[in-house]
Amino acid sequence: MMRTGGIFLKKKTKTLLTALAVPLGVGAVSGFLTQGSMDTFEKLKQPPLTPPGWVFPVVWTGLFAMMGTASYLVAITPKTEERKKALTLYGIQLAVNFLWPVFFFNAGWYFFAFVWLVLLWYLVYLCTKGFSDISRNAGYLMIPYLVWLTFAGYLNFFIFLLN
């Protein structure tokens, strides 16, 4: 019996590590592709409430860890169509998230990046709702992400207007 429990714990640990590695990896690759972007960002005319550049990687690391934990809480539930849909939405929003800094920083497409961010917000909302239907805690872990995206939308839109 102990052997079975150990295998179960090992599988859950592997699932958790994978769930954390995926969004953190997406963030790391995105950060690599947009390295030096904070120099560009600080040269832009910025709206009130814009935080210093060092805040962004700190916040995003925390958000990626929280969304990874949320995806883990969903992934360990029994397989259902609801779970499959929620995790599919999660993957789609991660892909959309990955592209936003490329559009904003690398291409300088501030308006397009804002529209893309609105799409991202909507996908994260749907994902949060889907996660919450499966695990209330998973849904709660996604709420700071929605709040941050709302704030990012404010920054993105006003950077578009000011630049």
Image (cartoon, rainbow, N blue to C red):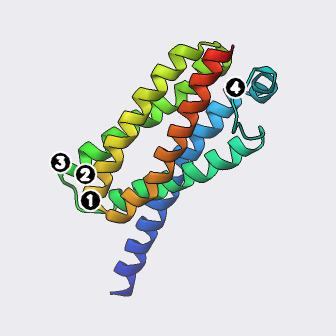
**Label 4 near label 3: C-beta < 8 Å?**
no
- Foreground: disc 3 or disc 4: 4
Cα distance between the residues tagged 2 and 4: 33 Å
Cα distance between the residues tagged 1 and 4: 35 Å
**Label 1 near label 2: C-beta < 8 Å?**
yes
Q: Which residue is mark 3?
A: 81
Q: Which residue is mark 1?
A: 134
Which numbered disc, 1 or 4, marks the residue that appears first in the sequence?
A: 4
Above or below 132: residue 81: above
Q: Which residue is mark 4?
A: 34
The quarter of the image holding the N terminus is bottom left
The numbered disc on residue 146 is none
Residue drawn at 70 percent across, 34 percent down: 48
- Foreground: disc 1 or disc 3: 1
Could you tell me which secondary element the residue under label 4 belongs to? loop
The three-letter code of the residue at mark 4 reads Thr
The quarter of the image holding the C terminus is top right
Cα distance between the residues tagged 3 and 2: 5 Å
The image quarter in which residue 101 lies: top right
Cα distance between the residues tagged 3 and 4: 36 Å
Cα distance between the residues tagged 1 and 3: 11 Å
Residue pushed farthest left? 81
The three-letter code of the residue at mark 2 reads Arg
**Label 4 near label 2: C-beta < 8 Å?**
no
Query: Local crowd at mark 1 within 10 Å, few (<14), some, or many (≥20)?
Result: many
The numbered disc on residue 83 is 2
Query: Local crowd at mark 4 within 10 Å, few (<14), some, or many (≥20)?
Result: some
The three-letter code of the residue at mark 1 reads Ile
Residue drawn at 26 percent across, 59 percent down: 134
Which numbered disc, 2 or 4, marks the residue that appears first in the sequence?
A: 4
Above or below 117: residue 107: above
